[in-house]
Image (cartoon, coloured by chain):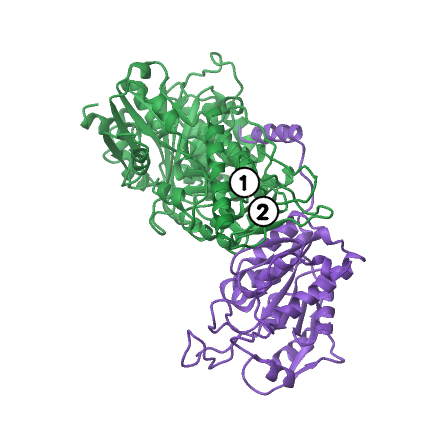
Amino acid sequence: MNPMDLATYGKNTWCPGCGNFSILSAIRSVLAELDGQMQSIENVVLVSGIGCHAKIVDLMNVNSFYSIHGRVLPVATAIKLANPDLTVICFSGDGDSLAEGLDHLVFAAKRNIDVTLILHDNRVYGLTTGQFTPTSPLGFKGKSTPNGSFEHPLNPPELMLASGATYIARGYTHGIGLLQKLFREAILHKGFSFVDVLQVCVSYNNLYEAYNKRTYELKDHDASSYEEAQKVIRSWNYDGSDVPIPLGKFYEADARRLDQAYRGSMPNALDRDNSISELLENFI
Amino acid sequence: MDNFSTLIGGIAGDGINEAGITVARLFCRLGYNIYMYYDYPSLIRGGHNFSLVRASSKKIAAHMDQIDILIALNQETIEKHAVRLKDSSFVIYDADKVMLEGITQKGCGLPITSILKEAGAPAVMKNTCILGGYCKVVGINWSILESVLKKHMEKKLEQNLLVARQGYDQAIESYRIDSLSSKIERNPLPIITGNQAISLGLIKAGLGAYVAYPMTPSSSVLDFMAKFGPQFGIKVIHPENEIAVMLMAQGFAYAGVKCAVGTSGGGFCLMTEGLSLAGMAEIPVVVVMVQRTGPSTGLPTYTGQGDLNFILSAGQGEFPRFVVAPGDAEDAYYWSAVALNMAWKYQVPSFILSDKIVSESQYNFELAGAGTVEEEATQQWSGQGKYQRYSFTDNGVSPMAFPPQKGQAIKTDSYMHDEFGITTEDAMLNKKMTDKRLLKERYLADDLERYEAVKVLSEGNGESAKTALLCWGSNKGVCQEAAEKLGLRAIQVLVLSPFPAKQLKDALQGIERLVAVECNATAQLARLGGFFGFEIDDRILKYDGRPFSLNDLESELGRRGI
């Protein structure tokens, strides 16, 4: 399958230079490639929240559920539980999953539900034109914090590690090869996969220069070690300092998944009627 | 015997609910109909709980203030309920704990605490012991109690039987409850709550998943589904909050699994953003919404009908919804199945609007008497051509398809969208899609003509009546009984959206005075009726968290010269 077969007539309204173009291109390539191998495209369901990130589903000729702000994961969790044969991929933003929907993110990791979440982490609200988010650095001057924010940023991979996610990685929208590799791994991983993508918002938080200078790809990192993962994740805490920013797979583990808990099929109508009558006997 | 009421009271932790159900089962085995009101405060141990079990030869769904037997496990029960005693009433009490001072009625004190001590039985068995005494007092044969205990005691059956027998042997027979079994040709009926009936109705219509966050008085649906659901292949999930609940329901529906959620007012507040998504994205979802006394935390374990306005208009934007308010367990079973069918037939949110009384009271339940209802087929995509999730059709209902479908993309969208499900801000398309969604309400309303969306409860003498009682939800039972007694007509509005104006008009033929009976302070059904041109002459409202007793309603009617 050619990645362009996955395009739609939907109009792309992202700003020129937006990091979302890289994510779109990477996910199309990965899904087109997987279609010929282990996962046919009609088994894939994309779920998005609301924000610039979410427009991606309109640009993909793939099953999709364009949900509401912050609520990507409950929708995705239920789709996976309803039909465990589906491959469920979520697109979310830092405002979407770390502010409005933080509870769902923590619980998805806690349940180790077998879905993938790609976080378009541009560290600013784009669609509402420039307010600070949970990953904006201390002192961020946005429209809602004109004198600089008073809050330290969250470290999303650290939060995911503590919550029980079993695949944790970071990519950057300049570096599509790595992005494709991480998306592929995350999708194929059995369990909750979290890919934090440093996605540059050219209009409200253009960090290309800083990221180009400071990001580096991990080498010889032992992703099976919780301690090593914690160490590398904590080496950069999303603040404004000049420390290097690691990219790559931080952690991968095998653990029990919620989607393994629900098996069994529904009875036919006749059996159901008989079971209702039998059940009522218990209440006489 | 037409009526026999038993009240058992004690502290939370005494097993008062279970004891009440045991009394109800005894009467059911004798051929009686029963109704049990269970009153408890919002705490786990202590406080005052009571079960009021009324038995009657007729079908009932309301309690009376006065009682025939008072069973007191503590002094507070005597103090609180002495006012309910008639001259002929009888008190059974734990003589080790309770003094009968100032009570002129006959009584039988049993040394419950001593009996338990002698038997080495734990304090929790005192309800079984006193029920042994109760059976002797009212003349119910030991063998009947024995069979009930044998069937339902999951733990320590032998010890329970021992203490019950002690209670039985030490009490004195003072009544003789006649068995109706010889007159009524039916096996004893199951005794279930409205919440259990709701669960069974949903199961009957093909429920595949139930998602809920616990909230009184809806939690027992979740408990029931978690216990019995798996044998029906139902996936039961208890997620982080009601926001997740409502969104999960829609994930299930997107993948083709029929799903219901359950909550009470506060939890439903959190569901409203998801509800609006269901309206826009045309995703079927059933909401079991059990009212309690509000606003806010209110009285968590008490009843109310204050959420009708909220349910009718919840969620931003305009979209159709189906709302039904069952009045007892049989309504609850039948209409819950209908609610699931309607949600999937018209791809709309569907509400089972219950209240604490319907949901947590016990009723004898006759499956055959609840009405025949089957799972209805949903409109499925033909498989021809390119699938469009929001295709325009004559009745506004777009055929459904669920992933995976070879060569197709099934796209759902919370934004305004085109037929394929891609976001659009086109003005003409926006209007057309809105019309499509609203068109479904018209067909839903037409479909409702097949159903008794408005029920005239008092057949017979109600036909010539000039005065009618208008009710919804749990006031069904009390209104029906009062109307039959006083020669009035009682009219129950079951479906509240789309409003069955034509059926209500027919039900009101010949009526000159219309009295709304509601458990809220602002007469919400009366207001809704007024919107459709129905003039309400009088309002009888109760909003102290407690249901109307038959006496409450009769005296309110009397004050109005009815």
Q: Is residue A14 above or below residue A10?
A: below
Label 2 marks a residue whose chain is: B
Q: Nearer the viewer, residue B403 or B463?
A: B403
Please provide percent x and percent y for residue A48: 59, 59
Which of the labelled discs sits on residue A192, or is there none?
Answer: none
Q: Are marks 2 and 1 in contact (CB under 8 Å)?
A: no
Q: Nearer the viewer, mark 2 or mark 1?
A: 2
Query: Chain B appears in which tint?
Result: green
Q: Quick one: which residue is furthest to the right in this view?
A: A37
- Decide if residue B541 is in sight here: yes
Q: Is residue A114 left or right of residue B122?
A: right
Task: Name the residue that disc number 2 marks.
Answer: B419
| Front position in the image: B450 or B190 | B450
Tag of residue B347: 1
| Screen quadrant of the N terminus of chain B | top left
Marks 2 and 1, how far apart in space? Answer: 15 Å
Report the residue at 64% width, 69% height from top: A21
Is residue B554 shown left or right of residue B471?
A: left
Find chain A in the image and tell me its colour: purple
Looking at the image, which is closer to me, B332 or B11? B332
| Residue B109 can be seen, yes or no | no
Question: 10 Å neighbourhood of mark 1: few (<14), some, or many (≥20)?
Answer: many
